[in-house]
Amino acid sequence: MRDAMWVTLQVGAPLLIVLLVVGLVVSLVQALTQIQEQSLAFLPKLAAAGIVLLVMGPFMMGVLRAWTVTLFDRMVAVGGLP
């Protein structure tokens, strides 16, 4: 269970942290300029998510692949082969 939580953090944290920072910056800009346009809050987050997924995607897939291999190895170790 501890390994599953660690994999979840490795895969999800980069995207969530970047979206949090972008959301805070956009909210600050909206509060300072008093512009309350909904698309202004959504589009930067969408662009940031795309960039993070392009940059961090190979790392995330590598972590998920390694976790999958580990799970299958553990299943074989527990159940054994016929």
Image (tube, rainbow, N blue to C red):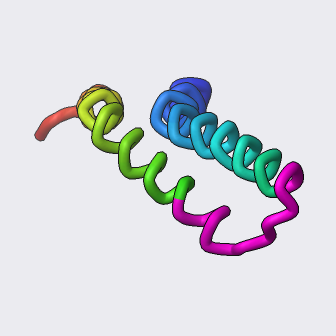
Q: Is residue 29 magenta?
A: no
Residue 22, position in %: x, y?
Answer: 64, 43
Q: Kindly tell me whether residue 71 is visible in this rendering.
A: no
Q: Residue at x 66, y 62 (%)?
A: 41
Q: Kindly tell me whether residue 9 is visible in this rendering.
A: yes
Residue 13, position in %: x, y?
Answer: 57, 34
Q: Residue at x 69, y 42 (%)?
A: 20
Outermost residue, bottom side: 38
Task: Answer with left or right where residue 35 lies relative to residue 54.
Answer: right
Position of the C terminus, as image quadrant, is: top left
Task: Answer with left or right where residue 47 lies relative to residue 1.
Answer: left
The answer to whether 77 is drawn above or below residue 46 in the figure is above
Task: Answer with left or right where residue 10 lies relative to residue 73.
Answer: right
- Toward the viewer: 36 or 12? 36
Residue 8, position in %: x, y?
Answer: 53, 37
**Highlighted magenta segment, given as a residue range:** 31-43
Kindly report the secondary structure that dominates the magenta region of the rendered protein: helix
Q: Residue at x 88, y 54 (%)?
A: 31
Residue 15, position in %: x, y?
Answer: 52, 41
Q: Is residue 41 magenta?
A: yes
- Toward the viewer: 15 or 29? 29
- Total tally of numbered discs in the picture: 0
Outermost residue, front side: 33
Task: Answer with left or right where residue 45 lies relative to residue 78.
Answer: right
The answer to whether 22 is drawn above or below residue 40 in the figure is above
Quarter holding residue 79 = top left
- Toward the viewer: 21 or 17? 21
Position of the N terminus, as image quadrant, is: top right
